[in-house]
Amino acid sequence: MSATVLTRARRRFGRMLIPLCGVLGFAFLYVPIFFLILFSFNDHIIPSLPFRGFTLEWYRELSYDFVMHDALYNSLFIAFWTTLISTTLGTLAAFPLVRRSYRLKGASQLLVLLPMIIPHFLMGVALLIFFSFLGVPLSRVTIILGHVVFTMPFAIMVVSARLHGFDRTLELAAADLGANPRRTFFHVVLPIIMPGIAGAALLVFALSMDEFLITYFVSGQKGTITMYIWSLLKDGIAPRVNALASALLLASFVLLLIGNWLSSRTSGVEARR
Amino acid sequence: MTAGRADIGVHAREQTSLWGLFPMVVVQLALFVVPIAIMFVYSFWTTQNYQVIREWTLANYLVFFESWTYPSVLFRTLWMSAVITIATLCFAYPFAYWIARYTQRWQKILLGAVVLSFWTSGLLRAYAWMALLGHGGIINKGLMQIGVIDEPLTFLLYNPFPVILVMTYFSLPFAAITIFASLEKMDWALVDAAADLGANPVRTFWFVTLPQTIPGVISAAILTFVPLMGMFFVPLLVGNPSSAMIAPLIANLMQAFQLGLGAAMSFIVAVVVMIIIVVAWRYIRLERP
């Protein structure tokens, strides 16, 4: 009898252990972010306990920080072009990667996978040496090139996921009804994979805004927002950084919501199925 | 223009042109493969007075291997990456398991919440930890206020512990998603069957659940370990300044215009990375975050 009680106790412990890991996991992920936001409103020069009262002072200070504005503008500029290039070229590449089999397919898949998992500093070092070898001065263009290399694989991955679930009989039907390939592409294929493309664009944008190490090597004089944050962090903690972090967090949250909304909207063709 | 049905089928299948690959391949060759090849070439050249001397020599590799200084940094990086990978997997597995037991609707919400956390700048999340762990940080101030400790805890910052903690924090979402994908594909009927046949939860996990998800665990391990070898700002911000990692060391060499030595060391790291990827190639599955 005591054995069954023991087993039951053990089982209850086991059943408790898994949810405990779940709760701890989310606490682990979100507690730092929670305090980050909380202390951006703290009326004290050090963002730590005790909480001395609510203030918007640090946000106001941020709005006067023109170096930060400049860096933010650079980052948006770079992220915009990176998104445009990576998403377009990634979408073009996703079609043959998903739909065709050909010689050297393994090699081209490796070309997609490697830049995704290789440590960024290796790419940064290689690109820095490459640009210095060619005599190309470091600028926003070199940062964009560096960002395209590592974000394009992510764009390919997201668009491919959408293409995998694509019902190709729809294309046959369009052709059957007399649409030429061009018409079929723009009126049937593109609307269906659009949520995938939008998702890819959003992911690329976020990755580019957040990139640190490649930028660190190839940025030269033009600082991005991550370079600016890096310069702040070397001086230790300050409530202004909390405010900046909270503002950026809100921006990426809004971006993600838009992305979710876009991908939850199904195209007309799909809705009728 | 009355094409037969079969012809249309062939037509539709053939219209996916391989030309779509062309721009991607050109960009990745020009900005990934060629730069790494040039880096390799540079590793056999040296620099003097901010000038690259284009004479072939093994001097850079000899500098790396002649004393214990540089290899020790590489081994420390490998060792720390391994410890962090294991910590991440031990945490990510039960976490993913917990999510996998929910209905699909809830799984979507929970995974969304996991993904959301790494949509924030990595630098700023490292900063959030600095504000928590520091000498006058939230943990120390909080514990002192409620009287648990009198002196600030010193092990919280500038030693290997916070590096392991923060890097585990960074690696958790990706590892959890990868393991979740393999748990989702697993045949749960086998787990129920094992329980019905009298196996206790531990036996069921060890002999039924874990073997089915091993490919996912290996994939998660590789996808955690490889990027960790390039950890840069976290050891600099919260680690011990005297125990350097390989990426900051190489960055310093590059800044001092030691391009040859930097290239040689980068190449050594790249070889280690490639060996790991080649050995584990068939397990690597990238799950969409």
Image (cartoon, rainbow, N blue to C red):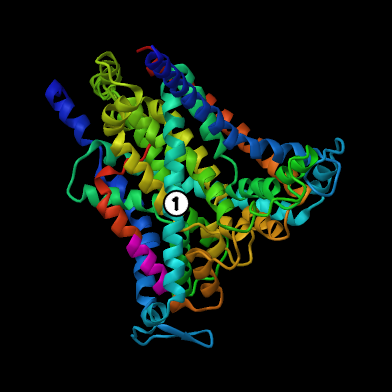
Foreground of the two, A9 or A57 = A9
Task: Pinpoint residue A106: horizontal percent, then vertical percent.
Answer: 23, 48
Query: Which image quarter holds the C terminus of chain A?
Result: top left
Answer above or below: position of A176 versus A145: above
Badge 1 is on which residue? B83
Q: Left of A188 or right of it: where is A132? A: right
Q: Can residue A89 be seen in this view?
A: no
Give amino acid for label 1.
Val
The quadrant where residue B213 appears: top left
Q: Left of A47 or right of it: where is A94? A: left
Disc 1 packing (10 Å; few <14; some 14–19; many ≥20): some
Q: Left of A62 or right of it: where is B233? A: left
Foreground of the two, A234 or B65 = B65
Reply yes or no: does residue B265 show up in magenta: yes
Farthest front residue?
A: A2
- Which residue is at a point 35% across and 66% down the rendered structure image? B34
- Which residue is at a point 77% across and 54% down the rendered structure image? A66
Q: What element carries label 1?
A: helix
- Which residue is at a point 34% across and 85% down the rendered structure image? B57
